[in-house]
Image (cartoon, helix red, strand yellow):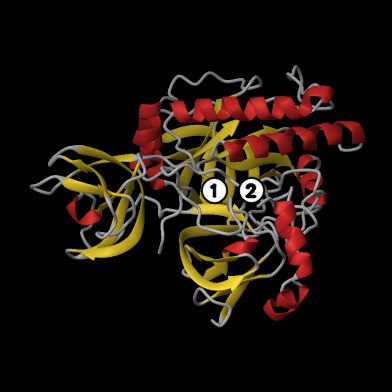
Amino acid sequence: MTYRARSMMVAAGSALLLVLGLAPPPAVAAPATSVTYPASASATRFTGWALDACTAPTTAQISAWRVSPYRAVGVYVGGANRTCAQPQLTASWVTAVARMGWRVIPVYMGLQAPCTYRPNAVKITPSSAASQGASQAADAVTRARALGMLPGSAIYGDMEHYNPADTACRTTVLTYLSAWTAELHRRGYVSGVYANLSSGAPALSQTYSSTAYARSDALWIARWDKSTALTGWAGVSDSAWTNGQRAKQYQGDHNETWGGVTLNIDSSRFDAPVATVAMPWTVTSSTPLNGRTAPSSRAPIATSYAPRSTIWVTCQTPGTTVGSTSVWDKLTNGTYVTDYYVSTASSTTYTSPLPRCAFPYQVTVAGLSRRAGPSTSYAVRGTLAAGALAWVSCQAPGSKVGTTAVWDRLTDGTWVTDYYVATPSSTTYTAAIPRC
């Protein structure tokens, strides 16, 4: 069912909306385009302090900086306007940095606004803004994947400061970024935009609910006022990008020294999606370890892994108990193995720096109730705003809402009806998401 059809059915079911305490969704759902995650995908959310440097630091420098408060590093993966060489930026560098406990934030320095203030920039052609936004997103995915950044990763399109008074230029930028988001979603990636608080950020906020543009999943603003607040941004509503969807670059080029190493960096505070990077571990069982289609010992066996072989883990998720743990590891081919027979740090609980498995989708209605269980009869534990990310871990049957009885369990343990989440279907389960 299309999102337009879903909205038409919602209009006919206004009594149900009143019972649920929800506002009707928009007439069409262009702002919340769905993400086509493959089975191997997972998104990673980072909350904390981040740095970015024009040239990616060496692994030795990153290792020394583990004494700093920073735990994420932004890297420029490509784009016509990328200015610095990246001799360090390889797939092995990304894996090594991730194994140290760092999160990686991919930034794509693509085409810039026709009215950009950036000198010598390669600019968007207004008549080709949509096609260029899509092609730039496709290139960004190719480059990110080559560096080991898996589907489900967020990629941030860098839109530098431009003249906000130029309305035609503003429309060109919004058209370009809308196509950027839609194409990233089509390819299974999460859409981020880096924008100045005086130009791109307020333009995106003003069109947050517009049916003319696909809405980005995350907004990373530049405002070098040294305030680290993730709310109260002038020109950006606090009701937009509300659930692990914001970052702020609060200080520009400056030197900092940690562990005896000095780097010239920009500083940011993050609570937003970043790259998902697989990490190698060893099978510890004495017999072949079964790889299953879901995190359960009852799920069908898809393959097996020889003792002492290396497996690449994308993320961890709860499942049936095996030995002393209910943790399961999702691998890069989309299969799951019990963590009990993997050389991670614990045989009872989760292992840092592996992230929890998640599939974020935007919410399509204002005030979506987060409940204690998969039914409208369960207690409400909070709400999600329109455009907020529902960080889905698994799906299960529950009470019917609209055209579906599917409910989404979120990573915080609460539940939302899938009817108001921009998953690919409004009637049934999503293939990439495991059943609870």
Residue 218, image x and y in percent?
Answer: 63, 48
Amino acid under disc 2: Asp
Residue 297: image location, x then y, percent: 24, 59
Q: Say which element carries label 1.
A: strand
Residue 71 lies, in percent from the top left, at 45, 47
How many residues crowd around disc 2 within 10 Å: few (fewer than 14), some, or many (20 or more)? many
Q: Residue 347 at what x, y percent from top left?
A: 20, 59
Mark 1 = which residue? 273
Q: Are marks 1 and 2 in contact (CB under 8 Å)?
A: yes
Q: CA distance from mark 1 to mark 2?
A: 9 Å
Tag of residue 217 = 2
CA neighbours of label 1 inside 10 A, class few (<14), some (14 to 19), many (20+): many
Q: Quadrant of residue 421?
A: bottom right
Please state which amino acid type lies under the numbered disc 1. Pro
| Drawn side of residue 169 relative to residue 342, left or right | right
Work out whether residue 302 or residue 139 is closer to the camera in this orientation and state it. Answer: 302
